[in-house]
Amino acid sequence: MLNGLKDRTIALARSPHAEKALFAISFAESSFFPLPPDLLLGPMAAAEPSRWLRYAMTCTVASVLGGLLGYAIGMFLMDSVGDVILRVFGYAGERREALEAQYAEYGLWVILIKGLTPIPYKLVTIVSGALHFSLPVFVAASIATRGARFALVSWLFQKFGPAMGPVIEKRLGLVLLGAALLIVSGFVILHFMH
């Protein structure tokens, strides 16, 4: 089922409504949709390299807005909708408790790291709302991490073309983890400089 959905998502990159689809998928992925917008973002940036930054920004804005929906689901509908979404993505019982405990202790760092990595961002948005995490900090961290992630993916595709697809698919997690470590290191350095 997911393979068919993945193929249809990638095919949208060639449609005249590609940018609207990119916005919709980026929005939905932050709260409930199972596939990342990178599947559409990459081919779009490769097809129209001069628009790579625009596409990355579209993805970021939509993802942050979708993240607010995920936050609202966690805050107001955790016992119904939020719980179902977390269960679908394998976060039930002890795994969910571990995520919530990690979040309660490290909050901002969880958003910064998981916002960049291929870990489903909807988990972060929903748990942020459920734990009543600071909304302004959540939004700022979401903008930073989602923006960095989508800019990197879009730039790589516009620079190296469709050949990046298989490389990114296999190594995206590693590349994004490296980027997350750089961002977190920057925050740690800034923290200790003050």
Image (cartoon, rainbow, N blue to C red):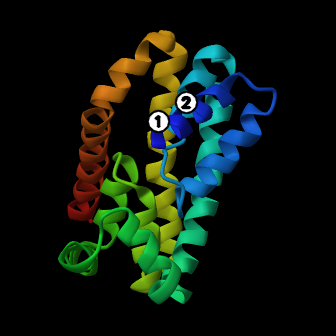
Q: Position of residue 123 (x, y in %)?
A: 39, 66
Using the rendered view, name the quadrant where residue 37 is placed. top right
* Image position of 171 with respect to 61: above or below: above
Q: Which residue position holds label 2? A: 7
Q: Position of residue 114 (x, y in %)?
A: 33, 56
**Mark 1, residues whose alpha carbon is within 10 Å: few (<14), some, or many (≥20)?**
few
Q: Determine the residue located farthest toward the right in the rendered image.
A: 16
Q: Say what secondary structure mark 2 lies in.
A: helix
Q: Position of residue 91 (x, y in %)?
A: 30, 69
Q: How many marks?
A: 2
Q: Say what secondary structure mark 1 lies in.
A: helix
Using the rendered view, name the quadrant where residue 66 is placed. bottom right
Amino acid residing under circle 1: Asn
Q: Which residue position holds label 1? A: 3
Amino acid residing under circle 2: Asp
Q: Residue at x 51, y 11 (%)?
A: 161
Residues tagged 1 and 2 counted as in contact (Cβ below 8 A): yes
Q: Residue at x 27, y 75 (%)?
A: 96
**Mark 2, residues whose alpha carbon is within 10 Å: few (<14), some, or many (≥20)?**
few
Q: Residue at x 42, y 81 (%)?
A: 133
